[in-house]
Image (tube, rainbow, N blue to C red):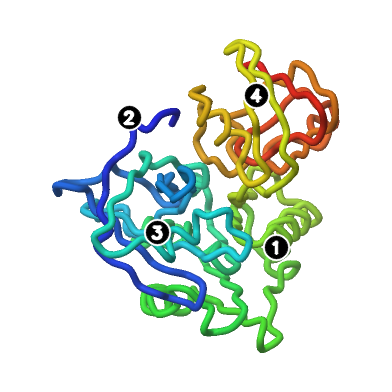
Amino acid sequence: MSDDAQTIAVEVIGIEQVTPLIKHFKLAPVGGGSLPVFSGGSHIIVVMQGAARLHKNPYSLLGSPLQLDSYEIGVRRMEESRGGSHFMHDAVKVGSRLEIAHPVNLFGLDKIARKHVLIAGGIGITPFLAQLEDLHGGGVPYEMHYSVRSSRHAAFLERLQRREGERLHMYYDSEGQVIPFETLLATQPLGTHVYVCGPVGMINHVIATAKACGWPDSHVHWEQFSAPPVGDAFEVFLARSKISVHVPPDQSLLESIEAAGVEVPYLCRGGVCGFCQTKVLELDGDLVHNDHFLSDADKAKGKSIMPCVSRAHGKRLVLDL
């Protein structure tokens, strides 16, 4: 996506508080009809007009891909929110209207896998709910491992228990329960694919454990959208557009460039897909990389930046935009 002309107007038709920190929203197209098709693991960008700025946040679709009269998303209230999650929790009511981008899938199920192992932590359960719908009735075995702080923080637990039965394995931090990653990944049959979404520590542990167990990289899938962290204000010069842009502490580089009227292509706005990768032409200072796309070697070179979540610390940054 690159501009709001490609968004869809939706109305909030349902809101449910599913945990102390997570709300479940149902979004239907304004005027009725069907929404675009999607597959398990897809996300949308929700466009929110806050009091001071426009927010564009990615959220996984968690409803059945077969039911297109509405979309479902889960939004966790973030303690250090820059405004997006607080807007969804505090300002959005049943009847509110929002804009959403068309679905994009960066976390789809592998079609040739002989088994699927799904691992979620906290709000990371959301992309798996639609994936599980895709798996129902299929011939490929799967299992779901879900770790949460306590039972009251287990979002969509009743739905999962009703639909998944013995394929669901729950782990509660409050009871000292942890997912046995080493045993789990060391005992899977050849052709198994593992998928993980949740806290960065969990994702990194799964990736490292799978590597230690000899899993090929192509069989390990993960997703984590990062919220752009706050940082020092800085100035950026867009060489092709020939304009200078001020980036305030609580606004991302991408948001500031968009506010200046310059389009930057994107898909996730969460540092995952690499679609907004931008060439750095000049730098006096340091780049603060917060993405999950660039390798450590590429980050050290300082020749590219993901403006959706990364920023600069220094006197001058010139981008090829």
Q: Which residue is mark 1?
A: 202
Q: Label 4 neighbourhood size at 10 Å, few (<14), some (14-19), many (20+)? A: some
Residue 246: x, y in percent? 65, 30
Question: Which is nearer the eye, 315 or 35?
Answer: 315
Question: Does residue 284 appear anywhere in the picture?
Answer: yes
Question: Which is nearer the eye, 138 or 253?
Answer: 253
| Quadrant showing the C terminus | top right
Real-space CA distance between mark 3 and mark 2, rounded to the nearest whole angstrom: 22 Å
Tell which circle, 3 or 1, labels the residue nearer the N-terminal end: 3
| Numbered disc 1: secondary structure | helix
Question: Which is nearer the eye, 203 or 81?
Answer: 81
Quadrant of the rendered image containing residue 120: bottom right
Real-space CA distance between mark 4 and mark 2, rounded to the nearest whole angstrom: 23 Å
Q: Identify the amino acid type marked 4.
A: Thr
In the image, what residue occupies the spot 68% across and 41% down? 291
Contact check, label 3 and label 2, Cβ < 8 Å: no
Q: Identify the amino acid type marked 3.
A: Ile
Real-space CA distance between mark 3 and mark 1, rounded to the nearest whole angstrom: 22 Å
